[in-house]
Amino acid sequence: HFLQDLKLFFSKFSANLLKGLIFIHHSMKIAIVINTSWNIYNFRIGLLKALQDAGHQVIAIAPKDDYSIQLEKEGFVYFPITMENKGANPIKDFFLIQEFKAIYKQIQPDIILHYTIKPNIYGTLAAKSLKIPVINNVSGLGTIFLHNNLVSKIAKVLYKYAFTYPIKVFFQNNDDLTLFVENQLVKVEKTGLLPGSGINLDKFIQQSYPSKKEFTFLLVARLLYDKGIREYIEAIRI
């Protein structure tokens, strides 16, 4: 009856993924799938620990990197997968779906949490073929919505097809949610809004603003227009 429990709790806690899973009354096997182990360890470890503390078995699925072993040291089962973060090779993507399917069939999770574009699309298609419920998370749009080329058009079609299946699709800002709904990539009743990924305030302690009137801003980012470089330079000139 865990699927009924999930639907009940998401009807009450539609804006809080963690509450919906933590308050399920029995232990579940939960898989979390992201495009790097580094991402899981640095940005989702709090979620994994909370689910683990709630009595669930948590399985991390991601390409192998220096942080994969750290996930195992934290007590999580880790499964490697071959996944390129960039690129849209249809042959490789087909085999990625098959690899997702093989891992999911081996693990037999009760539910799967997908993050980032390829798990959100191809992981969902694999889960759908096995009738495993999924929850998808769109933490950002990436570059496909910045360009109107063949790759972006294909990605949107795949999003629309894949996003008919999840129990819930969470977004981290209302603009992204609205864009997906207006482009008919997901039905509004499937969506939920989260207030960001959150940070560990015990690790990242809030600091007071400098007392002096003038202080220095530092931008740490890739030198891409998409990252706000133009706006940053314009702000400097004010």
Image (cartoon, rainbow, N blue to C red):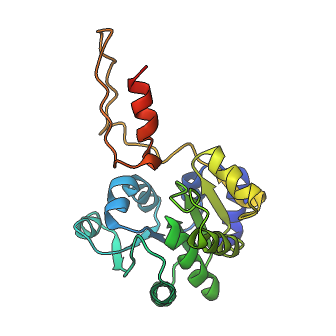
The residue depicted at 33 percent of the width and 54 percent of the height is: 42
The residue depicted at 52 percent of the width and 45 percent of the height is: 196
Picture coordinates of residue 189, whole percent (x, y): 77, 58
| 14 on left or right of 18 | right
User: Can you see residue 27?
Assistant: no
Picture coordinates of residue 103, whole percent (x, y): 45, 86
Q: Quadrant of residue 9?
A: bottom right
Of residue 172 and residue 145, the one placed in the foreground of this image is: 145
Picture coordinates of residue 145, whole percent (x, y): 59, 58
In the image, residue 172 above or below residue 121: above
Q: How many marks?
A: 0
| 150 on left or right of 76 | right
In the image, residue 227 above or below residue 141: above
Figure quadrant of the C terminus: top left
Picture coordinates of residue 14, whole percent (x, y): 68, 52
| 76 on left or right of 47 | left
The residue depicted at 55 percent of the width and 78 percent of the height is: 122
Of residue 7 and residue 79, the one placed in the foreground of this image is: 79
Q: Quadrant of residue 52?
A: bottom left
Figure quadrant of the N terminus: bottom right
